[in-house]
Image: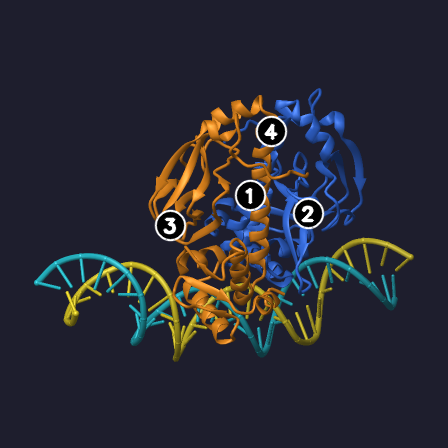
Chain colours: A orange, B blue, C cyan, D yellow
Amino acid sequence: MEFGYLDACYPGGLCAAGSVTNFAENRMIYGEGNPAEMFFKVVSGVVRTCTFLGNGRRQIDAFYVPGDLFGFETGQEHRLTAEAVCPAVLIAYPCRGVAILAASNAQLAHQLRYFAIRSLVQAQEHLALLDRNSATERVASFLIDWTTCFPAQDIVTLPMARLDIADYLGLTIETVSRTLSRLQKRGLIALPNIRQVKLLDPAGLGDLRL
Amino acid sequence: MEFGYLDACYPGGLCAAGSVTNFAENRMIYGEGNPAEMFFKVVSGVVRTCTFLGNGRRQIDAFYVPGDLFGFETGQEHRLTAEAVCPAVLIAYPCRGVAILAASNAQLAHQLRYFAIRSLVQAQEHLALLDRNSATERVASFLIDWTTCFPAQDIVTLPMARLDIADYLGLTIETVSRTLSRLQKRGLIALPNIRQVKLLDPAGLGDLRL
DNA sequence: CGTCTCCTTGATTGAAATCAACTTAGGTGG
DNA sequence: CCACCTAAGTTGATTTCAATCAAGGAGACG
């Protein structure tokens, strides 16, 4: 189904219904099992959604960047935990209120559907990423995906810690660290400091994805 | 966001717009890159959606069972391939026609949103499954998930081949086969024949998921 | 009865997890 | 400003588990 992109802020749309909120780094936005009363739009900063597996491991499902909507549920409860990766500004929308608005506003309904499907596409891409089972493939894909979020910049800042990357890629921090070092030694990337990456050879990096 | 389940077949709803189609086993329903003109509802049978990775590997994103809708896209093209796992009856809906209907039918719009979010939830659950990185955890989870689709039955039929299971779980057929044998030896399941499974100890199997 | 496909089982290899030590960066307080 | 402390990241050695390589079995079908 084809859905054009529509900005969330148009008269009578989402903007009217939401309230702006600030979250400090690592602050929880909502927890697994919390009632799904709100969904959110990222204005600035980065958000992660994650599940905690029984053995203490944590799985990061997605990172959300400015413009993204997250927190959609089919049930009464949030099935994931959402946390601010770095200081973040969000707009919170009440689900019920927006559902009522959407019932009489076809454009808004269309827009919500668009964002739900976009999240689905992202989840499917994440699945494909985890299936590339070599650590090098995963890290290379992650770097390419992340940097293409910021096409203008030469050196890209990673707002998340190594542990976040590891939990997103289904690897350990040691493996992520080693893989980054190896990519640097091979001249594919530069790591000027711990949170910054420069792609020296994007094409070569792309080849690693197979 | 909370969405109650609505049957797709109600007057003025989806049913009016769709056409019934049959697909033989392993028949392609649509291919990666095909124009996304239709989406589908499963009436009977099982459908898989998959991507082919550059190295020849295949990743199965999801299995769809009767009642499920699949084929939603944000762009103009299908990003996955859909195939019939076994003989399947589907209803095909034209995206554009349904979008027009949805613009003036709030209930239909709501329903489409519900199904898009449901696919998202399934994708997120699949992600969590792949993150349980032991083969035993994955296979146990798969068996539990699949059999809970058919709560009434004692012995459940797996419509898909071992290779499908392997590609869904990110494992090889050998590992799937070995793991099933091991679960059988441990008395957790019975495999009366190649396509049937009986959960002898669902609780014990659940414990393996961690 | 032979052949093909799908599945199972075994032996070996390899990549990432784990265990463990060390380095770096950042923050605090004397 | 520097000494200390802590959290985060890197690097190395070893182990573990699934992939790979290889061979054999079971069922379907002409």
Quick one: A128 or B87, which is closer to the camera? A128
Which element type, helix, strand or loop, lies under badge 2?
A: strand
Q: Which residue is mark 2?
A: B48
Relative to residue A23, is residue A97 drawn left or right?
right
* Front tag of 2 and 4: 4
The local secondary structure at tag 1 comes to: helix
Nearer to the camera, B53 or D15? B53
Q: Is residue A108 above or below residue A89?
A: above
Same chain for the residues under marks 3 and 1 in the image: yes
Q: Earlier in the sequence, mark 4 or mark 3?
A: 3
| Horizontal and vertical percent position of residue B199 | 57, 46
- Distance between the Cα atoms at labels 4 and 3? 32 Å
Give how far apart the Cα atoms at labels 2 and 1 are. Answer: 20 Å
Residue bearing the label numbered 1: A119
Q: Badge 2 local density, few (<14 within 10 Å), some, or many (20+)?
A: many
Same chain for the residues under marks 2 and 4 in the image: no
Q: Are marks 2 and 1 on the same chain?
A: no
Picture coordinates of residue C14, whole percent (x, y):
56, 75
Q: Mark 2 or 3, which is nearer the eye?
A: 3
- Residue where numbered disc 3 is placed: A86
User: Image quadrant of residue A181?
Assistant: bottom left
Mark 3 residue type: Cys
Q: Chain of mark 4?
A: A
Q: CA distance from mark 2 to mark 3?
A: 38 Å
Q: Which residue is mark 4?
A: A107
Which chain's residue wears label 3? Answer: A
